[in-house]
Image (tube, rainbow, N blue to C red):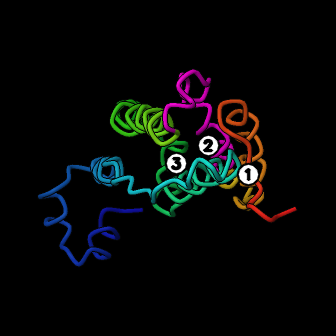
Amino acid sequence: VRMDDIAARCGLSKGGLYAHFQSKDGIFEALLARSLVPQQWNEPPPPPLRDGPRAFAQWVVQGLHAALAQPASVATLRLLIAESARVPHLVDAWEHTVVQPRVALLGEMLRARSGGRLADSIIVREPWLVVAPVSHALLSHVVFGRDLAQYREAHVELLCELIGPHMPPCEVPAGGD
């Protein structure tokens, strides 16, 4: 892509574009930096604990997929993979401003939303383990074109096994079988 093409696409003159950016790399860095600003994580309330580990695991997986499988997140991942050698400082910035705080927040949410029942769980001590299946799914989607939906149920099953020992089992409603 030439600067002339970028300027024309933006409705600017080439000089106008150079007034804001010194090069195509400057434009790329500005676009990537803009996508590094973390969005608010406004999750719905978790299901009641009496609904058991599956409902809680589904709540976690649904929230992660909703946040990480957005087109903007996928596009950022593609950029980071393709250009990480050229802009390692932006990759470091993304890790420190987006990834690490989000993973720490996830651990706190899991601890708080489970009523403290997960306090001793590996997924609270190492919350990146909860995100890892979504990260793998996104990489498979970006690199191999795989459908993200096929990974969800396996992710729920994994979390059920990790959460299950720390939460009460699903209760059968009164009068049920």
Q: Amino acid at mark 1?
A: Glu
Q: Which of 77/171 is in front?
A: 171
Q: Which residue is mark 1?
A: 171
Query: Which of the two discs, 3 and 2, labels the residue nearer the N terminus?
Result: 3
Look at the image and say whether residue 169 sits in the magenta stretch: no
Q: Amino acid at mark 3?
A: Leu
Q: Which residue is mark 2?
A: 135
Task: Return the x and y of residue 1 as percentages of the image width and height.
Answer: 42, 62
Task: Return the x and y of residue 171 as percentages of the image width and height.
Answer: 73, 51
Task: Return the x and y of residue 143 as percentages of the image width and height.
Answer: 69, 50
The vertical placement of 122 against 81, above or below, is above
Query: Which of the two discs, 1 and 2, labels the residue nearer the N terminus?
Result: 2
Q: Amino acid at mark 2?
A: Ser
How many C-alpha atoms fall within 10 Å of the one at disc 1: few (<14), some, or many (≥20)?
few
Q: Are marks 3 and 2 in contact (CB under 8 Å)?
A: no
Q: Secondary structure at mark 2?
A: helix
Q: Which of 62/138 is in front?
A: 62
Q: Residue at x 62, y 31 (%)?
A: 129
Q: Main secondary structure of the magenta part?
A: helix
Q: Which of 20/51 is in front?
A: 51
Q: Secondary structure at mark 3?
A: helix
User: Which label number is shown at residue 77?
Assistant: 3
> Which span is picked out in magenta?
115-139
Nearer the camera: disc 1 or disc 3: 1
**Furthest residue toward front:** 175
Nearer the camera: disc 1 or disc 2: 1
Question: What is the distance, in whole Å, between disc 1 and disc 2 at their CAs?
Answer: 32 Å
The vertical placement of 42 against 159, above or below, is below
Question: What is the distance, in whole Å, between disc 3 and disc 2 at their CAs?
Answer: 10 Å
Query: Which of the two discs, 1 and 3, labels the residue nearer the N terminus?
Result: 3
